[in-house]
Amino acid sequence: MASGANFLRGKAGWILLAVALVLPVSDLFLPLEWKVGDLMRPIFIFAILGLGLNIVTGYTGLLNLGVAAFMAIGAYSYAILTCDIYPFQFGFWPAVGLTVAVGALVGILLGLPTINLRGDYLAVVTLGFGEIIQDSLKNLEAITKGTQGINPLPYPNFFGYQFNTSHYLPWYYLFLGILALVVALNYNLKQSRLGRSWVAIREDELASTCMGINPIRTKLKAFAAGAAFCSLAGALWASYLGSSGEPSNYDFQISIIALCIVIVGGMGNITGVLFGALIMIGFNSIILAKLTNFLTHEGFVSGTNIVLIPNNWKFLLFGLALVLMMRFKPEGLFPSRQFKAEVRPAAGPES
């Protein structure tokens, strides 16, 4: 994958890869309170979720607020295909492959009636789709087990090695490998004719149509690809938890977090999405969690004092980050060149 290798030629790509590979090794020499390798798995999963949203919103310019629905579809599809209370009982890899296919199909089904909607109208429809999926999972109790969720799920098996919860290292490198594959696929898509068509539609749909691009077919492919990656993230999340989780776990907040990852990192840029996931989820899963444990252990806060616990302030901090980003750097920290040119066009001569 030559275009995927382009990512590694950049300094940021090498830094991310090097840190990800050696992080578990560094944990061997750190005290328990400083170990972070086990907390990196949610970052990998949400990075995949952000990459899926980046195809629809970052490349194609379609505001999708229903990412949580596709993550839920992925988690429940994977759970139904693997749990021993259902007749399928597939292994990890066949179940992941089928889950991706289911997500792509649902993405096409959502795209067909909404393909001509733009801006706020599309955002409202996808938001409503997320609520419909969440309520459907609660009410289809005979299939989804309602609010209980589907559990327990079998752990992955890789070349005869049985994963378990006592060692996080195999999970870490499994998720890191899948994320690397998703990144390579995203780079190949971005550099392909289809990827250039997505960007052309985002920049000027009328002009791209005049140049021979079929907007309906191209947008449907964006919906399908984005939904497939989001469903993959849901499948990995279910395998990580050992349960599908209850439907309320996949609420609107998940969609907002994914959107924050794309916006903060940089719209339309894969490296930006990876950094966005590291910043947003790392701040939540590592910094706030470690700070809360430290303050609780030292007696500065108690479990009953909800005001002083740092973890309870995360959504306020996320919202503040979005406000500051939109005010001072609306293109994100690592935007694509095309998107940066759209947000901050070069100043021309004064008239």
Image (cartoon, rainbow, N blue to C red):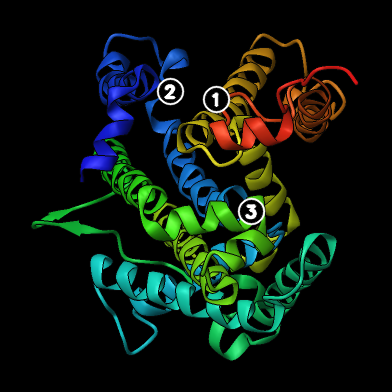
- Mark carried by residue 329: none
Q: Nearer the viewer, mark 3 or mark 2?
A: 3
In the visual, does 37 lie left or right of 54? left
Look at mark 2 in the image and give the residue it sits on.
36
In the visual, does 236 lie left or right of 3? right
Could you tell me which residue is drawn at 48 percent across and 64 percent down? 231
The residue under label 1 is which amino acid type? Ile
In the visual, does 116 lie left or right of 44? right
Q: CA distance from mark 1 to mark 3?
A: 35 Å
Picture coordinates of residue 270, whole percent (x, y): 46, 38
Mark 1 and mark 2 in contact (Cβ < 8 Å)? yes
Q: Nearer the viewer, mark 1 or mark 3?
A: 3
Q: CA distance from mark 3 to mark 2?
A: 38 Å
The residue under label 3 is which amino acid type? Arg
- Mark carried by residue 286: 1
Q: Secondary structure at mark 2?
A: loop
Please identify the residue farthest to the front as the structure is shown.
351
Picture coordinates of residue 85, whole percent (x, y): 39, 83
Q: Quadrant of residue 158?
A: bottom left
Upstream in sequence: badge 1 or badge 3: 3
Could you tell me which residue is drawn at 66 percent across and 72 percent down? 147
Q: Residues within 10 Å of mark 3 (few under 14, many from 20)?
A: some
- Mark carried by residue 202: 3
Q: CA distance from mark 2 to mark 1?
A: 7 Å
Judge by depth and name the residue closer to the eye, 59 or 229. 59
Q: Secondary structure at mark 1?
A: helix
